[in-house]
Image (cartoon, grey):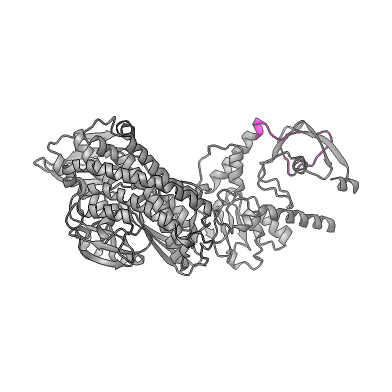
Amino acid sequence: MAALAAAGKKVKTFVIDGKDVSGTEDQTIIEVCRENNIEIPTLCYLDGLTEIGACRLCLVEVRGSNKLLPACVTKVQDNMEVVTSSDKLKNYRVKILELLFSERNHICSVCVSNGICELQNLAQRLGMTHVHYPYLFPKLEVDASHERFVLDNNRCILCTRCVRVCDEIEGAHTWDIMGRGIESMVITDLNKPWGESESCTSCGKCVAVCPTGALVEKYKNAVDKSFSYKKDKLKFLPYLTTMREVKNEQS
Amino acid sequence: MSRTITIDPITRIEGHSRITIHLDDEGKVSEARFHVTQFRGFEKFCEGRPFYEMPSLMARTCGICPVSHLVAGAKACDDILAVRVPKTAEKLRRIMNLSQIIQSHALSFFYLSSPDIVLGLDSPIEDRNLAGLVKSNPDLARNGILLRKFGQKIIELLGGKRIHPSWVIAGGVSSPLTEEQRKAILDTIPEAMKAITWTLDTVKPILENFREEMRTFGNFPSLFMGLVNENNELEHYNGKLRIVDSVGNIIADKLDPQKYYEYIEERVEPWTYMKFPYYKPLGPVEGSYRVGPLARMNIIDRCGTPLADQEWAEFRDLERGAVLSSFHYHFARLIEILYGIEKIKMLLEDEDILSTHCRAFAEPNNFEGVGVSEAPRGTLMHHYRINEQGLITWSNMIIATGHNNMAMNKGILQAAKHFIKHDKLNEGMTNRVEAVIRCYDPCLSCSTHAVGKMPMKIQLINSEGGVLDELTKN
């Protein structure tokens, strides 16, 4: 941050959860939170990809604002007072998770990402005990046409990390979203089977960033020692950040 | 006027069922039916799933023997991959499968059946349970708990958890055995050995008191089916299928389990969700067979481990030819626990058991795969078909309890004929009818791939279909 401040960016000082913090004017609340080890749950946000504020899990309370604001797309301001965890926020976050679980077929016990799934981890961390909404149990196809990877729409939460990483980092833009609302699906190449996609470079970045078991390596499951993409996600993330910094410098 | 007696629900078994006993015009028992009233649809909902998910998906059929389904499912996947599983992986899978058999047999015998045997079938219902057993014979209860723990602990050590481990996967196992794990298992063997030899010595004389039950508990001629190894010894993992008749003659040997559908057919009845498999060449009636510990003891030439062989020799002396009374399932179970402990020790002492080469990798090379192994309750068959993408298009499972379906119906009829003297239900009679079912240790949730509780209901029904009498137990 110091380097950025030196580059002519204005520094803002404000309060998060009663703690005095500071950040540059182009930083978002979540970036400052991460710098200060303040935990905010996220699913669509991923350091290094464009923020879209879609999952709404990072909603925070800001004094003076009558609505909750997504920390991933809200820029910091002088003297703002942010609350990142309260009963109200926890309640909303759990409800969002419950809705995500009810929308598709998330059966953790038999999922290949069991134990290494961000959705599952968040549900445990935020203390989600039940899903209070009726499950929709949609009948969705699995696309296993790709040589190395599998798309299982049953486990997709439409975070669009795959769409963004493919477009912004790999530059292939194989992934996109089709349809509206809960009918939305991630698709490859104008809804061709993944295996027939001409743009896909089979780089596997989408698999690495997928928070759930929607995009996985073929023939692998969570107990596999060789389950590299998902388990090595933490090693992969600095690469995204670096790529973004390179891009920023270029622009 | 003919009538029917219904027992609904049946207690101390795995699953939900009902028994109806039909009386003829003279009030004599004419027919008995074992209705399995639950349905789950595993074969259907796995359609469209990637094939390599099948072992852990199908293992969810049952919380008692998930390992058996894991093993059969993984073997079916091996067949789809067309790989040869590394020797070490095969041995490790065997260890886990045997541990599963030990813990399930311990559950069946000590927790579910021994209250009937130790306390007597006419003892008050309040005491005829595990708590009553702890009071009257604490050593037996303690050994039962110890043996179950022994099996469960090995499963946990190998697979990371006791129930639904996912360590057994297509092509082998996901991680090798470490020296510490090996030592940890070997350390528990002497204690388990002591528990089972003590139990055998204690229980054998008690079983002698059940002469009437031995004669009437599913004591009827039938075929017996199970796997045997290349030396015709007890086998739970690989091997070929053998079928013997009631006299003990081998009527079919070295049947390729991968082609089970050529000689086994499943019949459907409208009054139960459980199918009736039979040996095709002999037809649905003559071709009905029993599987499980009793059948395995009847088909083999020897067990293959020293102590179990001694017990087996005693077992074979019970009757000429094949041992027909289903009551002897209990004894057979105890012999298998002994065998399992001996065999696990032998496998662990094998020199290449610690090899790290325990998985074969491949892409699907077959569109179809069959996996057959022996589960605690008998022969378990998983059969999958996949499309070009490796997604399941069709699956079939024949579960041990399903094989025994015909035998259970016959057994109930026999017990009902013997014990029902009036058109009224009484506790002692229903206990015996239930105990017949319990001999087979049926896992109804598995066999119908169904979900349910464990209560029992018996109904007495007349020829017009009216319920005359009804007993419900929870």
Picture quadrant of residue B396: bottom left
**Horizontal side, residue A122 vs residue A25: left or right:** left
- Residue B374 appears in which quarter of the rendering? bottom left
Tell whether B65 sits left or right of B461: right
Residue A149 picture quarter: bottom right
Of B351 and B386, which appears nearest the observer? B351
User: Which residues fall within the magenta stretch?
Assistant: A69-89
Q: Nearer the viewer, residue B194 or B228?
A: B194
Apparent side of residue A65 relative to residue B102 in the rendered image (left or right)? right
Whether residue B98 appears in magenta in the rendering, the answer is no
Could you say where residue B68 lies in the image, as x and y percent from the top left?
40, 53
- Point out the residue furthest to the left here: B26
The reply to whether residue B322 is visible in this rendering is: yes
Q: Establish if A38 lies above or below A167.
A: above
Q: Position of residue B353 (x, y in %)?
A: 48, 60
Q: Position of residue A232 (x, y in %)?
A: 65, 55
